[in-house]
Image: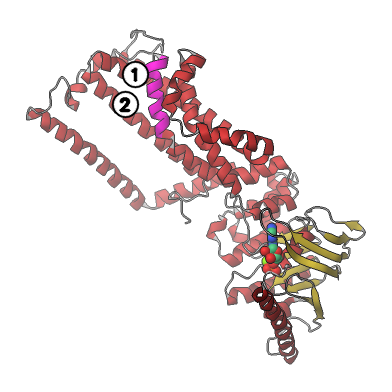
Amino acid sequence: MSAETVTLQHVGKTWCPVGRPSVEALRDFSIDIEPGEFIVLLGPSGCGKSTLLYMLAGLEDISTGTIREGGREITGPSPDRGLIFQEAALFPWLTIAQNVSFGLSIQGLGSKECEQRARELLRSVGLGGLMDKKPDELSGGMRQRAACARALAMRPKLLMMDEPFAALDVQTRAKMQDFLLQLWQDSGASIVLVTHSIDEAIALADRVVVFTARPGTVKTIVPIDIPRPRASRDPRVHELRDQFTELLADEVDRAFAEQEAL
Amino acid sequence: MLVTARARMMRGTRRLGVALPIENLAKYTQFGWAVASIGLFAGLWELAWALGYANPLLLPPPHIFLSNMSRTLSYFDNSDAIGGTAASSGLVGLLMTCVFTTLRVVTGLALGFVLGVAAGALIHYVTLARNLLTPLILLLAPISPVAWLPVSIFLFGIGNVPAIFLVFITLFFAITLSTVAQLETVPRSYLNVARIMGASERQTFLRVVLPSILPSLFVTLRLNLFAAWMVVLIAEAVGVGSGLGQITSVARSTFNAQLTFFTMGIIGLLGFFFDWSLRQIQARLLWWVAPNGGRR
Ligand SMILES: Nc1ncnc2c1ncn2[C@@H]1O[C@H](COP(=O)(O)OP(=O)(O)O)[C@@H](O)[C@H]1O
Ligand SMILES: [Mg+2]
């Protein structure tokens, strides 16, 4: 894997929906994502986190600035940059195995190889016995694992996740965070994960990018160099939690003030 | 891909069916109720006849219109030719009549479905087509298929085609409008997954968009099945000159009550069988959708 730094420079996005006033979601957002790095985007809702991920994935055009991978500008989506949604977005008309190998079969892999690869991938995410199940028959956490396996099938260099565990209960969430760290270490991919949970950010990230309220931009970037697994009783974790709570409270206050001014 | 999954599912259900005699019991009970329901109706009719309330010439009860089978069957003709008379045994004629009527319905439905989806997709994806076609289709859709009958005869003359055309019209607009509506609701995330995986437009349509709208289209198809079934009889009575519709028309003009009720029975059976087959197809083709439409 020849991973390269993904560079965002002065990225801005203004949504211009038809028949509604335009919204400036992002402004002047710059960051370098190093190969193999685990970045968490933390911010109040509506500050443009999803917008940023979609542009990084190449699914939406950027309004200003550039996003480069190595030297090349990102112009469209690619299997190299996988995206995982809050609802796993598995296709209900395919079995779990077929969902996992969907990308491979789109790329022209035969059905035998697809099944073989799906079996390996599902085993690696702990769903070995569920090849022939329908997505409906799985729990939320299992569906998210299957979605991860589907993205990993393409051997992405960058894996983006938009609040992937937000819909899960607390216990499942903790399990999925451990699972994700393991997966990240095994795959060597960089991960950009969006969350509004401070604890999740502290548990996972190499660096946490705190957003300002809309239009979203980088408020601060906080590196976390506590070795994993990080115990929630660790005093350094406590300290970080207070720090993030304060940073976010400022932005939520600002967002409210802005709404009242309207 | 779909085929193997379907086969796997079916194997699964069959195994389940054997393992659970309860399921068979439920089926027998259901069948029992069906017999009781029809028996009750026939019994009341027979009673009315026995008491002298039902004139056997106008409302012949089942045992009468079923008894004179050979004469009734002589009206059914296996040549499917206009105004032909029975040449061979009546039973073959009856079967052939049913087959020809059924073929007209199936052909019309298939054409209506495929072209309806195509028109819907055209309207959804091509702006020019949307602007040009939407008003026209909204205007034509509410017109009863029966009103198209003269048009179809002007256009296609007497024969098979006008009957097929009427069935086609019955389904076409409904499927077109349903397709347009459903295409709007395909989840964005499904399309995004396809884009990230590098699917071509064709692959996206066939492997993501179509399966996600198919369940609703099938509901539309089934809803319009009975209308199609009625329309084909009218077309046959007027514009084709053969088939079950033609027989009812003959029965009416000759005041043949026995033939009328016999044919009605056949039509009812065929319609029921049709709906049942569609349900079977639905269950196999759309294996991921729970039978009652909800989630499992
Ligand atoms: N497809 C879109 N069209 C128009 N406006 C959008 C669209 N997506 C997001 N927005 C707007 O952009 C802003 C940021 O949204 P989003 O990126 O979803 O925030 P977050 O993920 O941080 O909650 C919001 O005000 C939202 O209404
Ligand atoms: Mg979001």
The label on residue B266 is 2
Q: Picture quarter containing residue A212?
A: bottom right
How crowded pointer 1 is (Cα within 10 Å; few <14, some 14-19, many 20+) is rated as: many
Q: Picture quarter containing residue B55?
A: top left
Residue B73 inside the magenta-drawn segment: no
Instruction: Locate residue B212, reporting x and y percent.
Output: 58, 47
| Left or right: B19 as drawn, with respect to B75 | right
Between discs 1 and 2, the one toward the N terminus: 1
Q: Amino acid at mark 2?
A: Ile
Q: Amino acid at mark 1?
A: Leu
Classify A80 as above or below B176. below
Q: Is mark 2 within 8 Å of ligand 1?
A: no
| Left or right: B1 as drawn, with respect to B113 | right
Confirm or deny contact between disc 1 and disc 2 (CB under 8 A).
yes
Classify A110 as above or below A139. above
| Left or right: A56 as drawn, with respect to B206 | right
Instruction: Locate residue B69, reporting x and y percent.
Output: 24, 18
Residue B235 inside the magenta-drawn segment: yes
